[in-house]
């Protein structure tokens, strides 16, 4: 497993709050003309002219959303930003700014926070966003990261969850279930490591699914692709909780039903082989695994020719009248109602 | 001390994430035309036309920023919103929206979160802001609240920390030191309560300072007052960390010096009497106590006639060239360098 090889330990109390923030954010550049003022005042000042802005926020809590025994801090910083950007793209908007707040216990030395912020900085560079604010404080226990992401969208280009119509096609980007599968591998290796700390696992056969768990990407490219293809989805959501849960959101808010075709759900070969190894059903993993951060959207049938040959997009279902309900059509052509798995965090 | 008299306990796991958010936010109204879409999609959608927007965020952590043994949850929800609004007003902007995220352990029943959200709702009503998003998750320990506040300001009306000029006057709203003094009372009564749980303390003589700690207000009224008086400050900051620390921020960012007059620092009589009782120096409390959420700003001398009779505003100092340094001019007319107290959280 991944060990903290960092030998240097600088106590956070050596810096003080302002020194800490200055130190951690000193490499952050401002690139957007919409950022008038970033870090350093009571608030950031932004200017979007006539564009609408979108705002979204997520909390990541140690022991609930991540386990530092296998999640490197740099990856965690990256992921904390990316999962918020994913929500911005799900509005068909361009992400432009984030604020990042952390609560951290004294057990973390400065060098650990530097790793965390290096991941935040990497995400900011790759996705071209400005880090414009945040808060840094102590906690009694563990690490918590709160990110707020801001984006802009031209008038009437935003896409909500509630615009799907009967006969629309249900489309998903990329493939599903890999992040959850990767988590199963990491949890298994953690248990092995407890029993035999000298074990050096060969994780190469699982490289894709592990990367999808530790370093997910947000589908900024899909928003651009849809623009290039001149396709405006009728509804859109990102897949954070699992395909089932997101389909239910779209159907309930749009007041439509849906047939989802099991055979059409895109799965990476590594997900299929790993699910076989764990003796779990890959469709169940795709439906309920979550953390894929792919985009799920509906399009009018007349837009189908524009997307049909695209390797990044899969048509997986068909929207129906509300009273038809929401169903998974299995490979055996039976219909099973789609149900949300609910929220597991509070049951822990 | 304040006890939780709430007998009803509904487990959070009974609701699930979406049920919980829906339940807690069902009373929240949308009042601003700039709020196109609030809670319920991947992100909120806002539209400010040509106005600039300001964004600020703060984390409040149990055991670091608040102690639930004397902080009622309703007050905590109120305070979590207000401290962020204070940052918006410190930019000379109008607060319009907030997002509120909480991480909460299973020890809190639903009824506790209802109290917390009742406080958030009260702040939203009083300050006329829309709650447009957030995140609710579990934590391993304790309660953490992360609020992001958004405001709008007309072109070129925003006020930064860096605009103070030599010969400007330093002005503060309200009075200082009360929140810290109130905290001392609450901490003392907590210790008394530990020894004698049946003790019924008479807190009436401390009502003002306790309220300033438990239920601070943000000075929205001062922003309106300055507009009505046709005064645009040259720099502004809110007093969250203490007068010394905020003066240093303004001086460093504006590259000016400052003489602060001890005799001019506004103190409530209850602060003075309580400081005498605790045998602590009231000037030190005003300088370093923090959490007053008053506005500290500088104005050009030509604006002095507009503010001089106003009971809400006190001129407490005079800005100088940078090389003159930052000094407290005591009642005995000696000069003492102003120093920041630094950040105590990580030393705990």
Image (spheres, coloured by chain):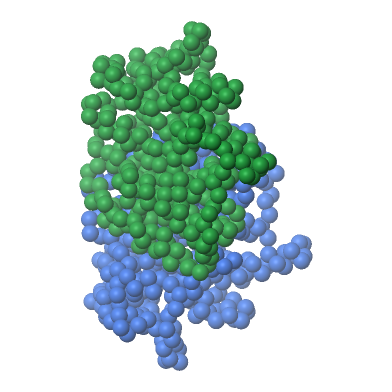
Chain colours: A green, B blue
Q: How many marks?
A: 0
Position of residue A71 in the picture relative to residue B307 (left or right):
right
- Residue A12 x/y as whole percent: 51, 64
- Residue A299 x/y as whole percent: 31, 21
Q: Is residue B149 in sight in this rendering?
A: no
Residue beneath the point at 49% across and 61% down: A110
Vertical side of A116 occupied by B229: above or below: below
Foreground residue, B193 or A171? A171
Judged from this view, the residue extending furthest toward the top is: A333
Could you say which quadrant of the image residue B304 lies in?
Answer: bottom left
Q: In the rendered view of the protein, which quadrant contains the C terminus of chain A?
A: top right
Q: In the rendered view of the protein, which quadrant contains the N terminus of chain A?
A: top right
Vertical side of B311 occupied by A341: above or below: above
Position of residue B209 in the picture relative to residue B329 (left or right):
right
Residue beneath the point at 35% across and 34% down: A219
- Residue A273 x/y as whole percent: 51, 23
Foreground residue, A54 or A141? A141
Residue beneath the point at 60% across and 35% down: A188
Position of residue B330 in the picture relative to residue A299 (left or right):
right
Foreground residue, B295 or A210? A210
Vertical side of A203 occupied by A143: above or below: below
Could you say which quadrant of the image residue A167 lies in?
Answer: top left
Foreground residue, A40 or A19? A19
Residue beneath the point at 60% across and 54% down: A141
- Residue A239 x/y as whole percent: 44, 31
Q: Is residue B339 in sight in this rendering?
A: yes
Position of residue A241 in the picture relative to residue A69 (left or right):
left
């Amino acid at each position: 497993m991944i060990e903290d090889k960092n030998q240097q330990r600088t106590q956070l109390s050596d810096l003080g709050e302002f020194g800490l923030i200055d130190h951690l954010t000193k490499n952050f550049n401002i690139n957007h003309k919409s950022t008038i003022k970033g870090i350093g005042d009571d608030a950031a000042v932004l200017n979007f002219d006539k564009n609408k802005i979108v705002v979204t926020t997520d909390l990541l809590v140690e022991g609930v959303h991540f386990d530092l025994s296998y999640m490197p801090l740099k990856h965690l910083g990256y992921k904390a930003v990316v999962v918020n950007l994913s929500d911005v793209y799900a509005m068909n908007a361009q992400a432009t700014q984030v604020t990042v707040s952390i609560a951290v216990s004294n057990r973390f030395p400065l060098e650990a926070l530097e790793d965390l912020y290096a991941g935040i900085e990497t995400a900011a560079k790759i996705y071209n966003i400005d880090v414009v604010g945040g808060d840094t404080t102590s906690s009694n226990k563990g690490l918590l990261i709160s990110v707020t992401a801001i984006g802009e969208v031209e008038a009437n280009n935003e896409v909500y969850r509630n615009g799907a119509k009967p006969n629309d096609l249900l489309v998903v980007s990329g493939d599903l279930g890999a992040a959850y599968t990767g988590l199963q591998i990491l949890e298994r290796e953690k248990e092995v490591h407890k029993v035999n700390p000298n074990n050096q696992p060969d994780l190469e056969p699982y490289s894709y699914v592990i990367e999808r768990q530790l370093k997910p990407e947000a589908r900024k490219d899909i928003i651009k692709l849809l623009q290039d293809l001149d396709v405006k989805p009728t509804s859109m959501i990102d897949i954070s909780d699992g395909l089932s849960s997101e389909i239910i959101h779209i159907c309930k808010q749009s007041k439509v039903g849906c047939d989802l075709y099991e055979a059409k759900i895109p799965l990476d070969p590594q997900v299929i082989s790993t699910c076989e190894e764990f003796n779990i059903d890959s469709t169940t993993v795709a439906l309920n695994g979550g953390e894929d951060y792919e985009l799920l959207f509906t399009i009018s049938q007349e837009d189908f020719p524009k997307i049909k040959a695209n390797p990044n997009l899969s048509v997986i279902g068909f929207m129906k009248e509300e009273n038809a309900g929401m169903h998974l059509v299995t490979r055996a052509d039976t219909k099973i109602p789609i149900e949300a798995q609910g929220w597991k965090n509070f049951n822990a």
